[in-house]
Amino acid sequence: MKRGFWVYLTLAAVWFLLLIWQWGEHKRVVNAARATLVDRARAITTTVGLVIRSERRGRGIVPQIRLELALNELIKPGELEFIALRNSSNHVVVKAGAAPGGDEERAVMGEVTWTQHAMVLANPVDLGSNSVSSNDIIRTAFVIPSTGLVPTNDVAGLDKITNQPPALDKPSVEIPTLEKTTNLEDTADQPHRTDVTDRRPLRIPPQYRRPTWMSPEEWQSLMAKQGLHSFVIRMSAKPVETASLQDLQLRGIIGFLSTLSVVGAGFAWRNTKRSADLGLRLVKASEMNMHLKQMNLAAAGLAHETRNPLNIVRGLAQIISKESTASDEIKSKSQAIMMEADRVTAQLNEFINYSRPREVRQSPVAVSRVVQDVVQTLLYDAQEKQIVIEHQQTELLIQADEQLLRQALFNLTLNAIQAVEPGGMIEIKIIHPPGPEALLEIRDSGPGISEEHRLDVFKPYFTTHAKGTGLGLAIVQQIVLAHGWEISCNGNEPWGACFTIRHLRVVS
């Protein structure tokens, strides 16, 4: 019992660990699919950054309409759903596509946010190395809106904030090195500031100078509002969901097969254990059977040896009862000894008959003739109780051992005669339905047999008669089983018992 428990526990542990392993592999596949999608989003933002770098051509200005057209070309439903460029305050400067729920402003720089069916990534704008000198001044790119920013009558200022090249007659201003700052407006207002650590002069490109029609505050506001700072990109998570579903189906199949394997191994172990137990029990039963056979032979020999002294005792009692000088009391006791000797001898004969192995020698047998012989043999017993025995005549031939069939019919008919009250009736019927088999029924009008005893009547030494030995029906069952037939005990409506022998093979 303990060994089986540990085997089942080990199988359950292996199954559980296998399921955990498959779940871990599924999570790894999903994470790999997500990482691939994130890398693709970052590659797109890097590509767009390269386009912006090439578009600004060193002046830091990108037209909005051209950037919007480029971004709209990237939008693909089911893949890239939304892309936006934000300023340093996380307000959208340029966008393409639709982002439900305000993802374009809530996205945190450098973080990846996963929604139900999408991935949102905020990535900084990479404009490359744009320092004026020693990385002291960090250039930026800012977008010029399509309308409403530049007065149409200021031609001199228009070429400073559009993508037109600056005039050749506007030389750069020679200035000393500035302090480290990203405020480009300060560089325009203080062209002659000198750094104590580096006195090399710098050339500030004209495009970073404040236009003449703008105040310093307006120029600073424009730079803060339209300057590009970060990307927000929303990618469809359908590739991740597809990869997750396919992998989950694969892991489900593996889990199902592993479950079947573990359950099959459990059943195999149980069957192996049962087979081992049955084999052990079979060996013990074989030993017991051999012992019973030896006991059976010993009991049969003892019964045979006991029958001879009983015959001697009966003979002496018979001689004493016939002596002329014997008194009536002696003669009466001698008669009692003879009756008991006959009763014990009959029981010994039945026991020897029951213990004898049944060797069936089958041949075509006329059933009606065997039934008629049995009825003729028991006619005196039936007439003594005024019992009527009815049987039909038929030409039916069956395959059977005639002597064993005669003995079985004799025991069944004698059992019926003993059970039926005086004036009763016994009926022996041979039924041949269409087919190769026939039935034999022995019905009586006796008290019948209760349902709880209908299986016990074929057991040795079980009897409902006061004078019965309990071996008659057991011998009948032996004969029936030796022929491959089947016998059953049922009720005979409205009263009595009915013994039916089935599967009698008919000889055509």
Image: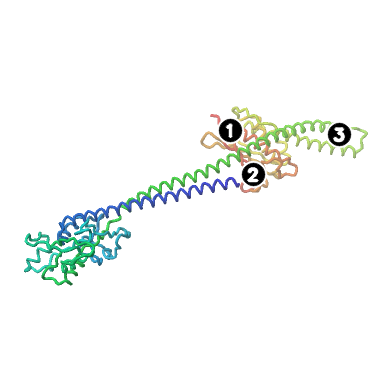
Chain-order first, disc 1 or disc 2: 1
Q: Quadrant of residue 403?
A: top right
Mark 1 is on which residue type? Thr
Q: Say which element carries label 1.
A: loop
On screen, 70 above or below 296? below
| Residue designated by label 1 | 394
| Residue designated by label 2 | 455
Label 1 or label 2, whichever lies nearer to me, is 2
Mark 3 is on which residue type? Ala
Tell me residue 406's x, y (percent): 66, 32
* Of residues 199 and 338, the one drawn nearer to the viewer in this rendering: 199
Q: Are marks 3 and 2 in contact (CB under 8 Å)?
A: no
Tell me residue 140's x, y (percent): 20, 61
* Of residues 339 and 356, the one drawn nearer to the viewer in this rendering: 356
| Residue designated by label 3 | 317
Tell me residue 82's x, y (percent): 24, 59
Q: Say which element carries label 3.
A: helix
Q: Is residue 444 left or right of residue 138?
A: right
10 Å crowding of disc 3: few (<14), some (14-19), many (20+):
many
